[in-house]
Amino acid sequence: MHIKQFDPKTVSEEYLVMANDTANEMRKETLPDDPPRPLSEFAGMVRNLPPMIRATMWLALNEEESRAPGYAVAFFMLTEENQHLIQYEVYVEPDARRAGVGRQLLQQVAELAHRENRRLMMTDTSDRIPAGEASMQRLGAKKGLSMRVSQLRLSELDRDMLRQWQERASERAAGFDLGLWEGAYPEDDLVAIAELHEAMNLAPMEDLEVEDEHITPDRVRQMEQMIFGRGDERWTMYVRERATGEFAGFTEVMWNLNRPAVAMQGATAVWPKFRNKGLGRWLKAAMLDKVLKERPQAKFVRTGNAESNAAMLNINVALGFKPYQSQIFWQAETDKVIAYLAGEAVASEA
């Protein structure tokens, strides 16, 4: 094996094909019910990475460079917040594991983190690949956030409950209006929409050492370029206080035509001063009602929540979402990773 480094935005199609093939091998393990991701979707994502994100990709190639049994990507934000942090992913195909490939790729990530003065390295593992958690424990990484990925089978959804939630909201939240944005956000409301997205900073982050992200209209547009560039479609429902015109909360659902059976539940948030009015249930129920009526090809809705996010988990469980897989987000000090790779013993801090 030998390692090659690439800029995802400019990498040749030859290497992009191999990177996507290897990433699809990982998806077979973590998302066994989903079809492979086509090259067009992967290319659309990496070619449209936002300018505020600096990304680097590595491939562990065989001698002939005909396949890449190992793949790694790392990225960090070129923003004022979280300048201490780099996020990364390392994947090695099952038949190439325990041969030092992952270690070589991690070495590249750690060296980049050191050069960029990013003291903290963050990644996630899935319970579907036990080797991932084992490697984090050997590394001495700390558990930062436990996530539950849940899935709802739409054929089992209680439609009477959806109706009841919406009717109840019309009484408890009589001073609010429900609205919808399809696709890109409207320019006229973009400043207020950016402020509304800052409500996601209230989501539990448990022990992750991350700073709140300041969302600006420019950042919103940069993220939209990547979302739509990879072929996703998006619906966003919002509630707005009639008297003030202030946005109180929102929820979003996205899907890709390459996987028409799976809708992805994105962010859902309600500002604290507007809570206890049934707005979260109203948003979720109205969105699912729209999916049922207008997306008959959708069979499942999938979402992720912190295990400590009891309020949102309670809503999802009531709707019929069931555990699909578990994720753990880990963090490790860059200096400790470099020491580990140099052969120095590191005690587990999991």
Image (spheres, rainbow, N blue to C red):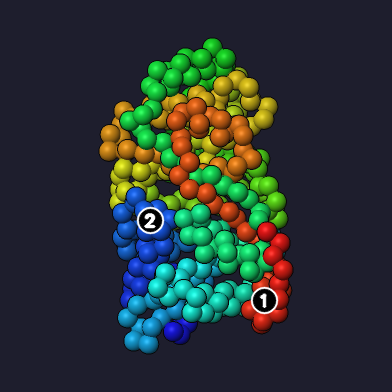
Q: Quadrant of the C terminus?
A: bottom right
Task: Give amino acid for label 2.
Answer: Arg
Depth check, front residue: 158 or 214: 158
Residue drawn at (57%, 47%) of the image: 147
Measured as percent of width and height from the top left, residue 277 is found at: 60, 20
Residue drawn at (41%, 70%) of the image: 93
Whether residue 120 sits left or right of residue 224 in the image: it is right
Mark 2 highlights which residue? 230
SS for tag 2?
loop
Q: Is 105 placed above or below 124 here? A: below
Measured as percent of width and height from the top left, residue 97 is found at: 46, 73
Q: Quadrant of the N terminus?
A: bottom left
Residue 195: which quarter of the image?
top right
Measured as percent of width and height from the top left, residue 28 is found at: 37, 59
Q: Is residue 55 visible?
A: no
- Which mark is nearer the camera, 2 or 1? 1
Task: Give amino acid for label 1.
Answer: Tyr
Residue drawn at (34%, 51%) of the image: 34
Q: How far apart in space, not on screen, are marks 2 and 1 (Cα)? A: 37 Å
Pick whichever of labels 2 and 1 is earlier in the sequence.
2
Residue furthest bottom in the image: 63
Mark 1 highlights which residue? 340
Whether residue 128 sits left or right of residue 205 in the image: it is left
Residue drawn at (57%, 61%) of the image: 133
